[in-house]
Structures are given as structure tokens and as C-alpha cells.
Amino acid sequence: MGEAARQVLIQKADASFVHDIYEIGKLCFSDAWREETVAHDMEGDHSEYFIALVDGKTAGYGCYWFIMDEGQLLNIGVRPEYRKKGIGALLLEAGLEEAVKRRMSSLFLEVRVSNEEAQRLYKKYGFRMLGTRKGVYDLPREDGYIMSKTLKGVL
């Protein structure tokens, strides 16, 4: 099947996707969560996971927390062979839509200073820089930018 014919399906994830999310996390993040951590987090009412399916295979995921009136994007991870195909943007859009549904006033995220590609995506969707958190990342040790988007009346 050609690249153009592939369909990307974004849906909410349930416990049957924990292992896939864990595996993608290991591919994408040097400080990936353990499988047990993903499973435990997924059980919380504040937590929502979205997955991207391409031809039935889990190509990526997004993890969001929704607490009080603030949302937080924790991770978007996409398998290397599916990158640069818009899947990260679709996972971001799913989280933004969920945040609006849950009546969040804003969505925050933190991104490595070196992850310029992710920063470009977030800026494209209206996120703005709020500041820098020094030494927040490990493996390697790195600063992170705090970014935010106001959601009142959005979408």
C-alpha cells in the first residue's frame, strides 16, 4: 500500500495499548517512563492518552493531564519510521480538543531546549514561551522551555 493511501486514526488509548506506549517511549525519550508507570498513570481520572494508528499499528501517542482548569502535555512520541508525516500534529490537536471539551483555560508543556522541531510545532499551534526551567531533563542534563497556550474560546 502506498504512502498516500495510508490512513492515520487518532483515538483514546486504553490499557491494551500500555505496552505499545511504553515501547514508543523507549524509542523517543532517554528518560522514558517504565511500563508500570504508564499503566498506573493511565488509570487516573486526570490522565488521557491518545494513540495514532497507521494500518493497525501504533505509530505514536500523546499523554495529557487535566487538573482543575489547566491541562499539561507530558509527552508526544512517534515511532521513527512514522515521523515527519503529521502524526505529532494530529496527536497535539487531539489533546487540544480534549482540553477544550474539559473546559481547561490553558495547556502547558515543557520541551527540551535542543528540541527545535517540537518547538516549531508548538509555536505553529499558538504556544508561547513562558520561561526556562534549568537542568530539568536528565540523560543528558538539559534545560527545558515552559510553553503555554490559552484555550478560552479556542476550537
Image (spheres, helix red, strand yellow):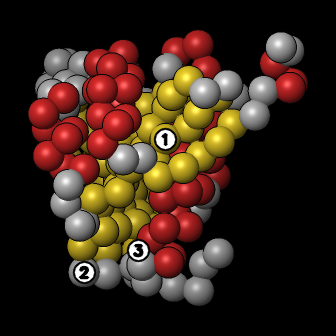
Number of numbered discs: 3
Question: Which comes sooner in the sequence, label 1 or label 2?
Answer: 1
Residue position marked by numbered label 2 in the rendering: 68
Q: Position of residue 25 (x, y in %)?
A: 32, 26
Residue 137 relative to residue 118: left or right: left
Q: Nearer the viewer, mark 3 or mark 1?
A: 1
Q: Position of residue 45 (x, y in %)?
A: 23, 67
Residue position marked by numbered label 1 in the rendering: 51
Q: Cβ–Cβ below 8 Å for labels 3 and 1? A: no
Mark-to-mark CA distance, 1 and 2: 24 Å
Specify the label residue 106 is tagged with. Answer: 3
Residue 131 appearing in the image: no
Q: Amino acid at mark 2?
A: Met
Mark-to-mark CA distance, 3 and 1: 22 Å
Q: Nearer the viewer, mark 1 or mark 2?
A: 1
Question: Which comes sooner in the sequence, label 3 or label 2?
Answer: 2
Q: Position of residue 99 (x, y in %)?
A: 45, 71
Which quadrant would the N terminus be assigned to in this image?
A: top right
Q: Nearer the viewer, residue 142 or 87?
A: 87
